[in-house]
Image: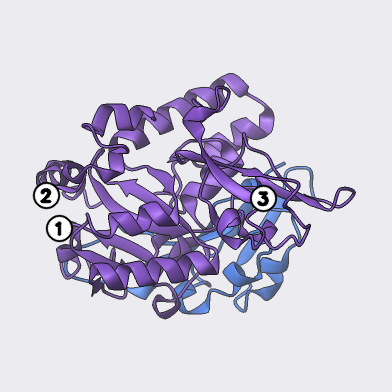
Chain colours: A purple, B blue
Amino acid sequence: MCEWCEKYGDGYERWYFNPANYARRLYKIRKEEAEVSGAEANPQVAGGMSVVGREFLELLDKGEIEEVNKIKQQAEAAAWVTHFGQVITLDEALRLADIMYPISLITCACRRSMGGASNEENFVCMGMGPGMYKWERWPDTYRGGVHFLTPDEAKEVLTKMNKRGLVHTIFTFGTPYFGGLCNCDYPDCAAIRTVVDLGVRILWKGHYVARINEELCNGCASCVHRCQFKALSFVPSRNKAYIDQFQCFGCGNCASECDQEAITLVERASLPALAKVW
Amino acid sequence: MLPTITFNHKKCTDPLSCRKCLFACPTHVLGLGTDVPVQKYRETDPKHFIVAGVRFDKCTGCMDCVEVCPKDAIQVSFSGGI
């Protein structure tokens, strides 16, 4: 159990299974802080949807570790209060489709900013809750509009996106209020690239860790392209896939691709050295 | 080593529909954004869109963005010279 589950789980197995964290009253609290300032979802103001900017990269480049860590901690602390995410598996995402309401398909702000994606090719993000009714008020934030989905339609879309190789992440908008179920990939996703490249944890690892059964792995390597976190590689001398479990975010996308059922997900909490590696 | 990437916004007037440099960059260094905050009840005018460097740590100095720009609006330099 991660510290967010302890804090906001309220008896549920995971904090994102707790329906109270999707409740409208939490959204109202956030509104007073963020919406009035108009600062939300402006890629440029946010530096390409990033929480750290040029100053951080320069300090990193110069090897000023103390200063780097200071900015990192400040950025993380701010993100954890306002807007951050956690990786979830497809099974968990499908379960959420029955909890969140309303559900809508929207365009992804990260890919708009970093990939230059047009609206037509960019409906890969899911938003939920009362925020979705604001799209006419904030057309720039919801560029391309919103498509409202039934839970069954949402499940179909999530399954398709998983097949494409996208990773499901759940995002707070005023923690612990959940407003987004994103479908992400490296490098355009600001959350994935910021945590993978820069170590700033605005995206937490999920509750699972993938592991390989080498006896079952036939070396087909079809799992390798599924990892968006630089945790999965291929060892030619052994003709096996290899998972760096300390780098694994537990999305399960490698496991679902494996025909041999050689990759399984284990509970992060069951591994003493990984139980607190989020 | 981090690059200095500058855009001449007088020349680069409609990056929202151009986006050539975004697609040309092999390491996805550049980002598309606006120079004004989001406003209620209207989409931001395309003339307020700008391109800027974001992932400076991933810039190799290949100059593909400089070459692909139809307006000759991009400059990339490293302090050590290139």
| Rendered location of residue B57, percent (x, y) | 65, 45
In the picture provided, is A77 more to the left or to the right than A187?
Answer: left
Residue A96 placement: quadrant: bottom left
Q: Compared with residue A26, is residue A155 higher up or lower down, i.e. above or below?
A: below
Q: Which residue is mark 2?
A: A24
Q: Compared with residue A82, is residue A217 higher up or lower down, i.e. above or below?
A: below
Q: Is residue A176 visible?
A: yes
Q: Is residue B32 visible?
A: no
| Rendered location of residue B29, percent (x, y) | 60, 56
Q: CA distance from mark 1 to mark 2?
A: 7 Å
Q: Which residue is mark 3?
A: B58
Give the residue displayed 46% in from the left and 47% down from the top. Answer: A50
Give the residue displayed 61% in from the left and 38% down from the top. Answer: A247
Mark nearest the camera among 2 and 3 is: 2
Give the residue displayed 34% in from the left and 34% down from the top. Answer: A80
Q: Which residue is mark 1?
A: A130
